[in-house]
Image: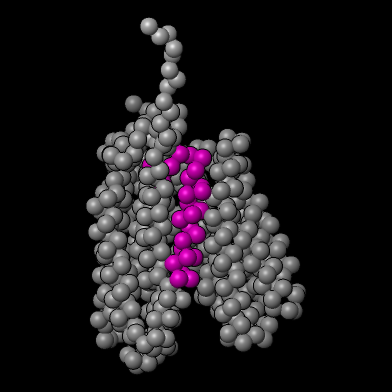
Amino acid sequence: MSNVVQAPVLVRATQVRFLVLAALCLATMIAYIDRGCISVAEKDIRAELELTTEQMGVLLGAFFATYAIFQLPTGWLGHVWGTRWALSFFAVLWSLATALGAVSHSYPALLISRLGMGAAEAGVFPCATNTIARWFPANRRAWASGVLGSFMGVGAALGAALTGGLLHVGLSWQLILAVYAAAGLVWALWFVWWFRDRPEETASVNEAELTLIRGDLPVETEYTERPERTPWRAILTSPALGWISAQQFFRAASYIFYMSWFPTYLKETHGVSTLEAGALTSLPLWAQMFGSFAGGMLSDTILTRTGSKRWARQGQAVASLVVCTGLIGLAYPIAEPLPAVLLISAGAFCASLAGPCAYAVTIDMGGKQVAPIFSVMNMAGNLGAIVFPIIASRLKTATGNWDAVFALFVVLHLVAAACWLPFNPEGKIVPEQRS
């Protein structure tokens, strides 16, 4: 009789969590293609519907108005329904809104399409962040958030290129919108069929992956209980969330400069052509995309090595925004456009290192209320994106040049860095109730 003791068989963890992240990235990409394609087709739409430039400006801005307003209700719905049903529902709604745009032959119908799209897409990131909290361990959440954030840039860039190419080969803007709407509907049907909100509910997740996701901790009640009542008063009066929302407001206000006035700034201060302005403007946007990915990896690496969220979330965010301030400030006196924009792009890369930290800290501190807490932060960011272009235009008009606008752009990063300092990222937004 043999006395040989066989070594235990090690079972490799399944990789379902990465497929979940890919699904969320695909939804993000589709949403950003849908929201951004209208700017590429703007000239065709304006000519066909005989719209004024002011009317097109309202159409372009209408999306962001409802996108900001509906952050809280969609975040709450994602918390109550779960991502499986809520995000699928939102995808159907924004796809139908896109389809409405495809059959629109009047300004009011197209305006309703944009308003509906903004309201439905408001739920994308609260749901996605809630899912990352459930499907990734603490030391991989910033990385997952960074990957998700980078697909905003992928969707924006792909949507612009794809729409421009389809228009060039003769497709109408209505048909293009119909194709994009169909893609969203297909994704929604697949997602609601395949996805489950918790790894424990997913048959293809083995025990090894479940242990990897949960680490050494027991399965927390926030992942297994029914969603509890959202304590809105505690959330909205939380000092920590106030500071987190403030940094998001100022970071988003600075980011929107690239998406709004930056091409005009380059043309009027550096004398570049429209073609050159477009190419130069793309550089900080690409830098932001790569920075988001790198920022998530760096934050989680710091967390793994130090075990400190102060260093991994707070420290990284503050350092990156301070360095960004210096780099962009150095670009101001440079007369040559390319070196100036390269320095600004380096600053944009550094600023985007703070993005995954902001996403991850809402997960770290969110407890059972990740979706509504993230929605509050994201709403603040969208308000910043709405306010800055208005202030910038008034500063330009009042001063007659871009000096004050650029100075404000630089200072916004420093203010965002300061907003990271007063709160403790090791705590909770809503303290857990002891039974």
Quadrant, the N terminus: top left
| Residue situated in front as seen by the camera: 368 or 94 | 94
Q: Residue at x 59, y 64 (%)?
A: 287
| Residue situated in front as seen by the camera: 248 or 213 | 213
Is residue 150 inside the magenta stretch? yes
Q: Is residue 164 visible?
A: yes
| Residue situated in front as seen by the camera: 391 or 77 | 77
Q: Which residues are magenta?
A: 132-158
Lateral position of residue 58 relative to residue 305, left or right: left
Q: Residue at x 31, y 37 (%)?
A: 200
Quadrant, the C terminus: top left
* Residue 116 found in image quarter: bottom left
Lateral position of residue 92 relative to residue 355, left or right: left
Q: Residue at x 75, y 75 (%)?
A: 334
Q: Is residue 325 above or below residue 316?
A: below
| Residue situated in front as seen by the camera: 196 or 138 | 196
Q: How is the image coloured?
A: one colour
Q: Is residue 191 above or below residue 36?
A: above
Magenta stretch prevailing secondary structure: helix
Q: Is residue 250 visible?
A: no
Q: Residue at x 58, y 85 (%)?
A: 275
Residue 32 lies, in percent from the top left, at 41, 67
Residue 259 lies, in percent from the top left, at 52, 73
- As drawn, which residue projects farthest toward the front? 1
Residue 148 lies, in percent from the top left, at 45, 55
Is residue 397 inside the magenta stretch? no
* Residue 227 found in image quarter: top left
Q: Is residue 143 above or below residue 428?
A: below
Lateral position of residue 337 relative to residue 36, left or right: right
Residue 241 lies, in percent from the top left, at 48, 48
- As drawn, which residue projects farthest toward the top? 1
